[in-house]
């Protein structure tokens, strides 16, 4: 008799097991929604799928009477632009800080303690300061995302840099490579796939910081819309927006994983997830 620890599901069973929790959650929601709406047709806490569909159609396919814009797509575009810029800045700074502190002992001695302290500061606590320094426009929201995830990326790249075998650096120096050549030709190619992995791990936090910034000071965006309609208990809008954010985060993760496999197949074959 096989022990449970040795039992591995087939691909079909794995897919069924993966879908089972989602199906159960869906059934529980439908049952709970029907019960609440049967008791009170005006209940807003658990809207039916038809109500959610009407809200999606209204937000995505009907222009706003006030602005003439399709709010769902305008919110999506604004949030993605802010998130993309913030992540791009964070990835660039994180890579630079990580590789310099990981490869150069002098830089590490001066910068690493500061980086450690900065990584312990709750980014949301800096939001009022960012609003004061950068104003309530786009820059403060982008900077919150960048400041929030840069230390995490930098520390991860720093650790990955130190994991590169010292023999490679010795061989490069034996062949006459200087410091810049070692960093660009030896370290950087090995760290780029690690950078993609680090960005994947920090995207969830990036979404959190973005939504918080949009909720406090914004005129559009996915986070702004969720916190705007909450005062009316518009769960038929909030739920699809939350589901849309989750889907976007999932698609970004899949896209980055595909990009890593495409650009760095040797890294994927080495066991990257």
Image (cartoon, helix red, strand yellow):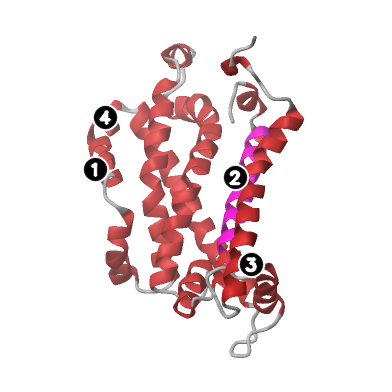
Badge 2 is on which residue?
253
| Residue 145 in the image, given as x and y percentages of width and height | 42, 56
Q: Which residues are magenta?
A: 241-262
Q: Nearer the viewer, residue 139 or 103?
A: 139
Cα distance, mark 1 to mark 4?
Answer: 18 Å
Badge 1 is on which residue?
117
Query: Mark 2, residues whose alpha carbon is within 10 Å: few (<14), some, or many (≥20)?
Result: some
Query: Mark 4, residues whose alpha carbon is within 10 Å: few (<14), some, or many (≥20)?
Result: few
Where the C terminus falls, by quadrant?
A: top right
The kind of secondary structure the magenta stretch mainly shows is helix
Cα distance, mark 3 to mark 2?
Answer: 34 Å
Q: Is residue 74 visible?
A: no
Task: Tell which circle, 1 or 2, labels the residue nearer the N-terminal end.
Answer: 1
| Residue 141 in the image, given as x and y percentages of width and height | 42, 65
Query: Mark 3, residues whose alpha carbon is within 10 Å: few (<14), some, or many (≥20)?
Result: some
Query: Mark 1 or mark 3, which is nearer to you?
Result: 3
Task: Tell which circle, 1 or 3, labels the residue nearer the N-terminal end.
Answer: 3
Cα distance, mark 4 to mark 2?
Answer: 35 Å
Query: Mark 4 or mark 2, which is nearer to you?
Result: 2
Query: Mark 1 or mark 4, which is nearer to you?
Result: 1
Pointers 4 and 2 in contact (C-beta within 8 Å): no
Q: Where is 81 relative to 254, above or below?
A: below
Cα distance, mark 1 to mark 2?
Answer: 28 Å
Badge 3 is on which residue?
34
């Amino acid at each position: 008799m096989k022990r449970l620890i040795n039992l591995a599901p087939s691909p079909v069973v794995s897919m069924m097991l993966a879908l089972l929790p989602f199906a159960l959650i869906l059934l529980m929601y439908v049952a709970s929604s029907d019960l609440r709406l049967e008791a009170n047709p005006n209940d807003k806490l658990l809207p039916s799928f038809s109500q959610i569909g009407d809200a999606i159609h209204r937000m995505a396919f009907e222009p706003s009477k006030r602005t003439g814009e399709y709010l769902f797509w305008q919110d999506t575009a604004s949030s993605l632009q802010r998130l993309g810029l913030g992540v791009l800045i964070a990835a660039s700074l994180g890579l630079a800080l990580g590789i310099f502190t990981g490869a150069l002992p002098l830089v590490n001695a001066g910068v690493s303690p500061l980086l450690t302290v900065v990584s312990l500061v709750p980014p949301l606590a800096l939001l009022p300061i960012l609003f004061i320094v950068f104003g309530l426009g786009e820059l403060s929201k982008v900077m919150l995302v960048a400041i929030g995830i840069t230390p995490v990326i930098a520390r991860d790249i720093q650790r990955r840099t130190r994991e590169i075998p010292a023999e490679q650096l010795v061989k490069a120096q034996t062949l006459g490579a200087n410091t810049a050549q070692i960093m660009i030709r030896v370290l950087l190619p090995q760290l780029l796939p690690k950078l993609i992995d680090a960005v994947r791990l920090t995207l969830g936090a990036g979404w959190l910081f973005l939504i918080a910034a949009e909720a406090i000071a914004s005129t559009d965006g996915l986070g702004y819309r969720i916190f705007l309609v909450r005062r009316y208990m518009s769960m038929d809008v909030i739920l699809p927006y939350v589901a849309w954010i989750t889907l976007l985060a999932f698609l970004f993760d899949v896209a980055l994983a595909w990009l890593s496999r495409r650009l760095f197949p040797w890294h994927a074959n080495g066991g990257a997830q």
